[in-house]
Image (spheres, rainbow, N blue to C red):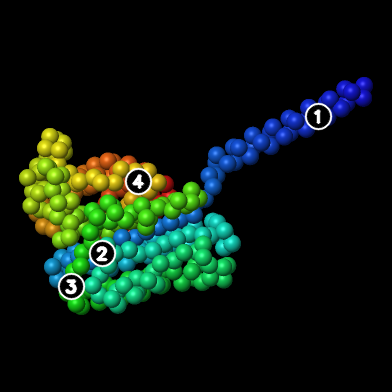
Amino acid sequence: MKRLVIYSTLLLLFSCGNNNQSNSSTNNQRKPQEKQLNISILLDLSDRINPTKYPATPEHFQRDIEIVKTITEYFKQNMEKLTAWRAKGKIRIFFSPAPANSAINNIAESLNIDCSRLDNKGRKEVYDTITELFSQNLSEIYKQTIATNSWDGSDIWRFLKDDVKDYCIDKDSTYRNVLIIFTDGYIYHKQSMYRNQNRYSYLLQQNINKYRSTNYKEEIEKDKFGLITEQKDLSNLEILVLEVNAEDSRNKIDEDILKYVISNWFEEMNVSKYQIFSSDLPANTRKRIENFLNK
């Protein structure tokens, strides 16, 4: 009789343990662990933000600032979910190459946040001030750029070729690596003008205009047209491209062509997840960003 009681007790405990383990497993499936954020923002200070050449309402630089506000607010939500003592997120602004204006570079230094290096008090300060910090400093960066009428542009092709792995991918697997690129979609920088058969390091009207037709996808595939792919393993990186905008409103199909070619480029680099969006009103872009970041 005593043996029967002991056996029954052990069976009950084992069953409870299995139930708890099963419940715990189910809960883990329902609530995947929140990852730390490692957000890199690559800004394009080309003439796409020139309010005289490409006027818009709101202006393109104003749209950029509103977009960054959305990104910083999402960063704050991630801090809330992880709580102050566990929040080790990173967010920074990049230029490629660095602007000739040293004042802009100095301002950009203040937009490099690494919560893993801060104590709880420092993280609380980041949480309280990050949106205002980024908004004010970006406003100053754009103000200076427009005032000097100097458009340094962004060498997106070379950044993805040489720098993205070192700058934007944290080797710690607890981080979610996200690169957000601001560009009108025309990829160009004077220091990177290369061609290999029908592959280029740039996308300009001069090499995409022949594909301005409804069957542009078939023509691009037939000609094997695209960007030169140097990087092959970006499987630990998500990329969000924003503010694609045709230079000439009569050639809006440029946006479709640019998105298609850049998408093929990302596929060849094995980017884990990506989306590419045209310039839009901030409220619409905000929704798209939130959908992307919330997976």
Q: CA distance from mark 1 to mark 4?
A: 50 Å
Three-letter code, disc 2: Pro
- Residue drawn 56% across and 68% down? 119
Q: Quadrant of residue 135?
A: bottom left
Marked residue nearer the N-terminal end (4 or 3): 3
Q: Secondary structure at mark 4?
A: loop
Disc 3 to disc 1: CB gap under 8 Å: no
From the top left corner, tell me how far across and down residue 265 is, in percent. Answer: 24, 44
Residue carrying label 3: 150
Q: Quadrant of residue 187?
A: bottom left
* Circle 4 or circle 3, nearest the eye: 4
Q: Secondary structure at mark 1?
A: helix
Marked residue nearer the N-terminal end (1 or 2): 1
From the top left corner, tell me how far across and down residue 200 is, in percent. Answer: 15, 48
Q: CA distance from mark 4 to mark 2?
A: 21 Å
Marked residue nearer the N-terminal end (3 or 1): 1
Residue carrying label 1: 10
Marked residue nearer the N-terminal end (2 or 3): 2
